[in-house]
Structure formats: C-alpha cells, structure tokens
Amino acid sequence: MAFFTSLQSVALLLSMVAPGYILRKTSMLNSGAVEPLVTLLLYVCLPFMTFSSIMKKEYENGFLGTMGIALALSFILLIGMYFFSRIVFSRMKEGAEKRIIVASGYMSNCGFMGIPLLRVLFPGDSEPIVYAAIFTAAYNLLAWTLGIYAISGRKEYIDLKHGIANPPTLVLFIALPLFFLSLRPPPEVMVIVDFLGEMTSPLSMIIIGLRLAEIRFRDLFNSPLVYAASAARLVLVPLCTFGLLFLWRIFLPLNESLFLTLLVIMAMPVGTNVVLMAEMFGGDKPNAVKCVLLSSLLSVITVPLVMLLGRAL
C-alpha cells in the first residue's frame, strides 16, 4: 500500500510537467521563458512555501535539538555523497563530461521537487517541510562551494556568498525566530503567503516540462553515462543514505519523520541547478539537461521504492 500511495503521489506531481511541455512544443512559450519562471520560483514561491510550513508547525520542547540533528545529518550526508560520487566515477577521463556526471551524482532537486513532493507525501504535516528547509539551506551552501568546484574544476569560482545569501536560506532567518518565539503573522498575511507558496509544486514541474520539450525524447536514452549518473543519484545515494541513517538510528535518537524526510529528499533526481551552473561556469550543458530530465522521469519508480524501504523499519 505504501508503494502505490507513493507511486501515485510522485506520478501526480510529475504529471504537472505536461503544461510546460505542451506550451513549449506549441511555441506558446519560447526558451527564454524558463529563466523568469525559475526566478519566480526561487525568489517568491519556494521561500513563501517554506515560511508557510514553518509557521504551521507548533514549537515543542526538544524540537530545537531535533533541528540541530537535522542540520548535522544534512551536512554529513551531503559531504559524504559528494565524495561518494567522485569515487564512483573516478575512472572516467578528466574533463567537462566527467565533472557534470560527478555533480549529477551529488546535486539533487531537493528544493524545487523535494519540498513539493514532501507536501504531497505527507499532507497536512508541516514537520517534514521544516526538516527539508534545513536540508536545503545546507545543500545551497555546499552547492555553491563543492558543487561549483565539481562542475567547473576551478576553485576561484567558489562563491560562499551565494550559498548563504539566497532566498530559501534567508527565509529561515526570518521564520525561525518567529517560530521559536511562537509569534505568527496576522491571518490576512498568511493567506497571501499560503497562496504564493502553493504555486511551488506546479511551477517547478512546469519548468521541468519546458526543459523536457527542448530536447529530442530519444536523446534521453542513448547515453550510458546519463544512465550511470541517474543510477548513482536515484539508487546508490538513497541506499547509502539508508545505511547511514539506519546506523545513526541504532546508536542515537532519530524520529521517524526526520528519518523519512532525509531519506526521501536524498532520493530526489538530479537538481536543476546543475544545468544553471553548467551554463554559468562553462560546464557540459547537454549532458546536464539529460541527467536532470532522465532522472526526473525515472524517479517515478525509484522514489516510491525508497519510501517503501524507509517505512519497512
């Protein structure tokens, strides 16, 4: 039952790529539409959804410690997966192609797809979104340091400022003090926040649909390296994450909500910011796009399997 519920949730979310795909294929939107939509998602929808979710969670004794564990585990998992991806693809010839494959194994769609999916998988439960927001803050910090280095191979491109000064992270500096002080904005304000936050799921999928329409469908399935990157991202990384979390759970406390949140968010497909950074820093953009799209399609099957594995304990 858990598998089919998760399968339905992931399929429902990914079905939202259809409007973007159709609009691009019919030339009602051109390739230039992606950039403003990504800006809208990054600077408005995703921060408002994070803020809304945190405001819906009531502070409980001991929750601060759980949030600290979430942050520590996020960094451990992300750094571990970076080095894991480098080891998996260590025999590849050095170059732009290898760098994008390594980055695809490490960088996930935790914000654009992970948080919306958690909203679908855990309806009415804001706790997973709080953990996911903490994970995303850690991810953004490492994406603009280790991620940029993985793609460009040049340390001078590392930008710590972008890792901190980005909307999904900055919103935590506003929301968390209000959360800990049990302060909430007026209901009229929260109605607007909720409306803007609810746009995150469909908008993120529409953007993927626009990207999908820009390449020939058969090109997604003709590159062994893209399959390898997708397998690392969707299968190997979640299995390693499961093992690490299982060991942590044996020796230290880890509640089920945090366990499942981290497991699911580490099972997300290749992140769209891999494409963004490939464009910014001269990376292998064609393979970056293929990795994002193929892994997103395959995640319809892999994410429910990961959920089934997580709920088996």
Image: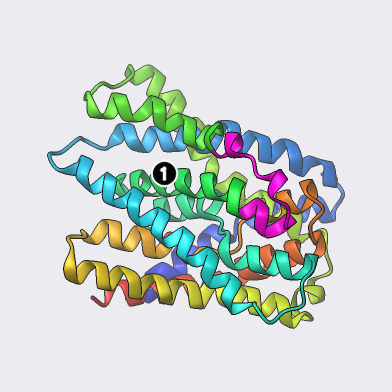
Q: Provide the residue span drawn in magenta.
A: 147-163
**Front residue (pair 290, 160):** 160
**Is residue 82 shown in magenta?**
no
Image side of residue 312 versus residue 228, left or right:
left
Mark 1 = which residue? 133
Tell me where residue 167 appears, x and y as whole percent.
Answer: 54, 32
125 to 263, vertically: above or below:
above
Q: For the residue carrying disc 1, how many other residues have a C-alpha within 10 Å: few (<14), some (14-19), or many (20+)?
A: many
Amino acid, disc 1 = Ala
**Front residue (pair 87, 296):** 87
72 to 90, vertically: above or below:
above
Main secondary structure along the magenta-highlighted residues: helix
**Whether residue 142 is visible:** yes
Tell me where residue 250 appears, x and y as whole percent.
Answer: 18, 71
Image side of residue 52 versus residue 249, left or right:
right
**Is residue 156 shown in magenta?**
yes
Quadrant of image for the C terminus: bottom left
